[in-house]
Amino acid sequence: MTILNGKEIATDALAECREQVQALEAQGVTPGLAVVIVGKDPASHVYVGSKVKTCADLGIYSRRIELPEETSQRELLEVVAGLNADPSIHGILVQSPPPPQIDEEEIIRLIDPDKDVDGFHPVNVGKLVMEDDSGFVPCTPQGCIHLLERAGIETAGANAVVIGRSMIVGKPMALLLMGRGINATVTVAHSRTRELARVCREADILIPAIGRPEFVTADFVKEGAVVIDVGINRLEDSSRKSGYKLVGDVAYEEVAPKCRAITPVPGGVGPMTIAMLMGNTIKAARSSMGQPEGG
Ligand code: NAD
């Protein structure tokens, strides 16, 4: 059994990003990322902190915009419109989930598609469906594909089962897996799927993105499968200083011995997501210079 070390693979990807940032700097452009966060959700603040720190490590300019919990839709739209018009900002993301008064879909639609480094705007979703490389691919599923590729996992013709159908993970994950270059045979399971464990046991590659701690047990997994655990769940743990521990959607201890390869949580998909966000920001900066292919 191989543990797919997302932290290590992400570190390599970030080293490549650092070189690309330096090349852009030499041409007089510093990639810029704006991260907007509304409210006090502690997990969201941790994610935003990691994104901003990674930008600093790579030499990417970042602007963290913290807005109060009671921010109105109109105020948030105005902030996004300002960022759309700001030439020093190449990528914009609004951290999810926002407070309930915010209509997230309307916000996403307002972000300039050329700055939509999360890849959630309908233009970028359309480009993903059409396999048009000029668009932005959502960071988490992009990170999962990167992991599979770097780990040398054979995907062509493999049975891949994705659990979850969200716009952030499940749907784009399925599209990428079935796309040219990956060529898996894809099943998307979700909360209404019948006989979920039996469906999952067909998988050569199993990708749970559910948001339920340790939901996927050994009876979901075929001997020799590759498991990419997207889930990040906080469980109370009074023995830790933070008061919680992170677990995936997979019951790691019982599932890992059956696997050919598996990602841990933390240290699997999470670091890959941030690395792909940095890559998307660099891509946005290049595109703004009319250099979609790099250099
Ligand atoms: P979501 O709540 O939008 O979607 C969850 C999906 O799981 C839904 O499509 C639903 O149909 C499915 N589901 C729910 N209960 C189910 C059940 N009992 N059986 C089968 N399917 C079921 O969540 P999301 O935004 O897609 O995130 C999923 C998980 O991935 C969360 O734990 C989230 O924290 C994590 N996540 C991790 C990263 C990362 O960087 N590693 C990024 C994004 C999300």
Image: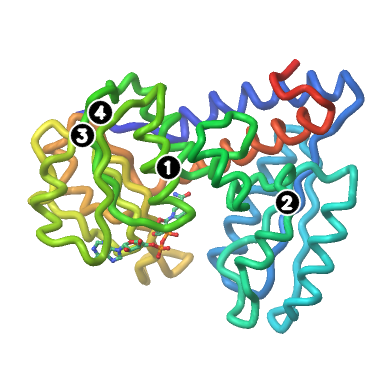
- Where residue 235 sits, quadrant-wise, is bottom left
Residue 273 on image: x %, y %: 52, 43
Instruction: Please tell me whether residue 273 is drawn above or below residue 251 in the rendered image.
Output: above
Ranked by sequence position, the earlier of labels 3 and 4 is 4
CB-based contact (under 8 Å), mark 1 and mark 4: no
Give the number of the disc on residue 92.
2
Residue occupying image coordinates x 74% and y 45%: 115
Answer yes or no: is residue 19 visible.
no
Ranked by sequence position, the earlier of labels 4 and 2 is 4
Q: CA distance from mark 1 to mark 4?
A: 15 Å
Q: Residues within 10 Å of mark 1 (few under 14, many from 20)?
A: many
Depth check: 174 or 274 in front?
174
Q: Residue furthest top?
A: 295
CB-based contact (under 8 Å), mark 1 and mark 2: no
Q: Amino acid at mark 3?
A: Asn
Q: Amino acid at mark 2?
A: Ile
Q: Which quarter shows the C terminus?
A: top right
Residue beneath label 3, please? 159
Residue 141 on image: x %, y %: 45, 42
